[in-house]
Image: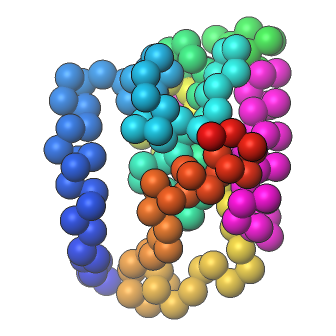
Amino acid sequence: MSMDVLWAPWRMQYISRVDKNGGCFLCTAAAPGDDRERYVLWRSETCFAVLNRWPYNNGHLLIAPNAHKADLTDLTDAELADQMAMLKRCERNLRRAVSPDGFNVGLNLGRVAGAGLRDHLHWHVVPRWNGDTNFMPVTASSKIIPQSLEALWELLRRSNGTR
């Protein structure tokens, strides 16, 4: 089955500048700077939550340690606990903002497990809705994301009382 191409010209701005220096996009997001521009939603002492620029579904978030670490065994107990607290925060705010029926939560460790970025561990938080797998991905090999990253960032920041 061939893949249909959906026109998304707004993505060119991101594509044209991503990984120009071969650096880690999560380290770039973790560094101090413009959270809105980087789509960083929330920060804690040792980790942060950011919108996934290549989402599987609307509201797809990533949680990553501030430090460039590849494996769970590299994390301190405090870093791991902080990421679990951030996971709770993400779930709570996604429920408030976009009312999903459930979530897929997980991480890929190593290339064989599907990790596109092997050297900076990150959790995926993917909201799911009853009926969100419709005919488009099944028959047309296409996925539709109904909301821009900018609009979702604003909505999620408001759901936490943060502006």
Q: Is residue 21 visible?
A: yes
Give the colouring mode of the picture. Answer: rainbow
Q: Position of residue 163 (x, y in %)?
A: 62, 40
Quarter of the image that includes the N terminus: bottom left
* Magenta span contains residue 87: yes
| Residue sticking out furthest to the front | 163
Residue shown at the point (53%, 35%) measured from the top left: 40
Give the magenta range: 81-110
Q: Is residue 117 visible?
A: no
Q: Position of residue 34 (x, y in %)?
A: 43, 29
Is 159 positioned to the left or the right of 152 in the image? right
Residue shown at the point (62%, 56%) measured from the top left: 155
Is 86 positioned to the left or the right of 34 in the image? right
How many circles with numbers are drawn on the protein? 0
Is 54 positioned to the left or the right of 100 in the image? left
- Above or below, 149 relative to 28: below
Q: Nearer the viewer, residue 41 or 143?
A: 41
Residue shown at the point (27%, 57%) measured from the top left: 11
Residue shown at the point (57%, 17%) measured from the top left: 66
Q: Nearer the viewer, residue 76 or 82?
A: 82
* Magenta span contains residue 109: yes
